[in-house]
Image (cartoon, rainbow, N blue to C red):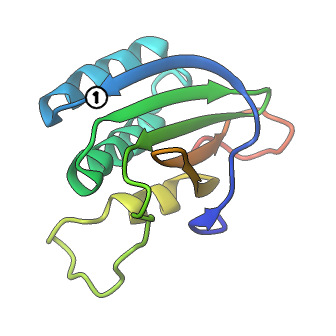
Amino acid sequence: MTGWRISEPVVAEEVGRWTVGEPVELRVLRAELRRVAVVPGDETVLVVATELASNALRHARSQAVVKLMRDDGSVIVDVADRDPDGRPSVDVRRPRRTGGLGLRLAENLAQDVGWYPAVGGKHVWARFTLPGSASGGACH
């Protein structure tokens, strides 16, 4: 894992897109991600997608557009928001059990993470290696 660097993820086929405008809609996002079942039985992608969308709602104070993309060996979660000035940063001084662990969780569970500015906002993404892919490893 390389940390939150400015970088666009590899181009991959989009397999799903959802817009989340309110925290209660995170449940719908989770259900839809389960329906897509990228890696059956693995909740890792679902947890990180939900955390990144939640961060967009809370910190960017905008709706989140969540894209799920797939290539031959990985799955990418890309979350866009309307905050061009905010950038993902892990607050290492924050005490445990006080919230704010979504980015740290994404860093620990994903193979790679990053973000990039876009017109009117930014994208935050996480990439997961699929089990049995040429790059080895499992979807964390």
User: Residue lying farthest front?
Assistant: 119
User: Residue lying farthest top?
Assistant: 35
Q: Position of residue 34 (x, y in %)?
A: 39, 19
Say which residue appears at 21% left-offset and 52% top-offset: 58
Q: Does 89 sit left or right of 112 as displayed?
A: left
Quarter assignment of residue 85: bottom left
User: Residue lying farthest right?
Assistant: 134
Q: Amino acid at mark 1?
A: Val
Q: Position of residue 35 (x, y in %)?
A: 41, 12
Number of on-image labels: 1
Say which residue label 1 marks.
20
Say which residue appears at 45% left-offset and 40% top-offset: 80
Viewer-side residue, 133 vs 35: 35
Q: Does 4 sit left or right of 91 as displayed?
A: right
Q: Is residue 54 above or below residue 2?
A: above
User: Residue lying farthest bottom?
Assistant: 93
Quarter assignment of residue 12: top right
Viewer-side residue, 101 vs 56: 56
Q: Does 23 sit left or right of 131 as displayed?
A: left
